[in-house]
Image (cartoon, rainbow, N blue to C red):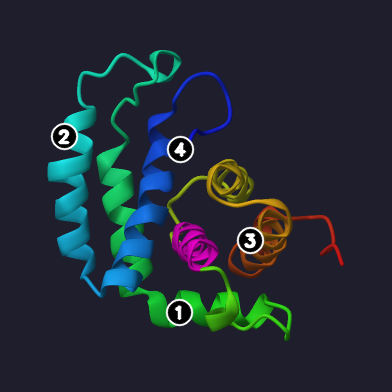
Amino acid sequence: MKPAGSKARPRTLARAAAVQALYQCEHAGETAETVIDQFVRHRFGRMAGMLGVEEGEVPPPDVPLFSRIVRTATAQQDVVDPLIAGVLPEAWPMPRLDPVLRALLRAAGAELWMTDGPPARVVINEYLDVAHGFLEGDAVQMGNAVLDRIARTLREGEFTDPVRA
C-alpha cells in the first residue's frame, strides 16, 4: 500500500494500518487489543528508522491515531455498522462487501464518529487515498459515496451543499 503523494504521511499510514488491523480482527477473530499489540510490536517496530518512501522504506505511522481508530471502530461497531449499512445500496448489504472495503468503511466511520477529529472532508480524502492503495474502480467509488453520506449524517454542520445523488 503506497499512499498518494511522494512523501509518506504518518497519519495516512496510521489509517492504512487501521484498515489492515480491522481486516485482521474480522478475518482472524482477534481482539482489537491483540491486533494493536501485534502491529506495534512486530510491524511498526521494524519500520522505525527507515529512510522513506522514495527509497522503498516506510516511516512509522502515527501510532496513537492508529490505536484510537482501531479501538473506536471495534468498541463502537454497533453504532458504525448500522451507519454504513443504512447508506449502502440495497443490493450490497454489509456481508456482501469486499472485506477490505468493509474494514476501510469501519475505520473511516469510526473516525467520522469521533467528534474531536479532523474535518469530515479531510477524513474522506485520507481514506480515499488509502482506498486507492487497496481497492480498484467501483469499490473506491462506492467507498467515496458511502463515506460522503456517513459524514453528512454524523457531521451535518460541516456541509452546506445538498447531498449528491
The amino acid beneath tag 3 is Leu
Quarter of the rendering containing residue 29:
bottom left
Q: Vertically, is 99 above or below 158?
A: below
- Residue highlighted by disc 2: 45
Secondary structure beneath label 4: helix
Examine the structure image and report whether residue 75 is included in the region drawn in magenta. Answer: no
**Main SS type for the magenta part?**
helix
- Residue highlighted by disc 1: 79
Which of labels 1 and 2 is toward the front?
2
Cα separation between marks 1 and 2: 32 Å
- Residue highlighted by disc 3: 147
Give the mark nearer the N terminus: 2 vs 4: 4
Label 2 close to label 4 by CB (< 8 Å) = no
Quadrant in which the C terminus is drawn: bottom right
Q: Report the residue at 56% width, 77% height from top.
A: 83
Q: Vertically, is 152 above or below 52?
A: below
Q: Report the residue at 67% width, 60% height from top.
A: 139
